Amino acid sequence: MIRTQIQLPNDVCQQAKEICKTCEMSFAELARRGEYILSVYSTPSESSTSWELPKPRKLGWGGLTDAEIKEQAHFTNMEDGNGTSSNETVE
């Protein structure tokens, strides 16, 4: 084995120490288990398939058309809390 030193941000080091305490393992063992991560995740150049944007899903309120949603949004923006237009005065 080769002995080495690493520099970690304080929060990462604290998380690593908590993992070691919870899993009852040494810090060195946690670092060695990082080898598994390297074997699972390949580098982008080794990847055989490229990532593609997921297909869009139909979102929104069920049962309403796009035009009805737009109309309701416009209507909501035109009213204040009293149910009157924002440019009308309440007497």
Image (cartoon, rainbow, N blue to C red):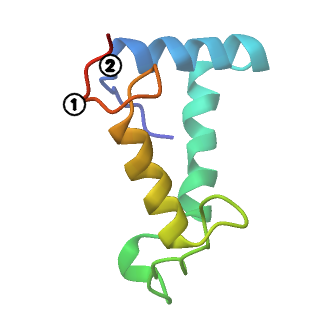
Amino acid carrying label 2: it is Pro
Residue appearing at x 45%, y 78% in the figure: 53
In what element is the residue under mark 2? loop
Quarter holding residue 71: bottom left
Q: Residue at x 25, y 19 (%)?
A: 89
Task: Judge from the rendering whether residue 51 lies leftward or rightward of residue 78; answer left or right.
Answer: right
Mark 2 neighbour class, 10 Å CA radius: few under 14, some 14 to 19, many 20 or more = few
77 vs 43: above or below: above
Please name whichever residue, 69 or 15, is drawn nearer the observer in this view of the structure.
69
Q: Nearer the viewer, mark 2 or mark 1?
A: 1
To which residue does mark 1 refer? 87
- Would you say 50 lies left or right of 89 here? right
Amino acid at dot 1: Asn
User: Can residue 24 be seen?
Assistant: no
Q: Residues within 10 Å of mark 1 (few under 14, many from 20)?
A: few
Which sits in the foreground, 43 or 49?
49
Q: Earlier in the sequence, mark 2 or mark 1?
A: 2
Q: Position of residue 33 (x, y in %)?
A: 63, 41
Mark 2 and mark 1: span between their CA atoms? 54 Å
In depth, the one of 53 and 74 nearer the eye is: 74
Quadrant where the C terminus sits is top left
What's the mark number on residue 9?
2
Farthest residue in the bottom direction?
48
Q: Residue at x 33, y 27 (%)?
A: 6
Q: From the viewer's perspective, is residue 65 above or below residue 41?
A: below
Which label was assigned to residue 52?
none
Q: Position of residue 12 (x, y in %)?
A: 43, 21
- Residue 11 seen from this side: yes
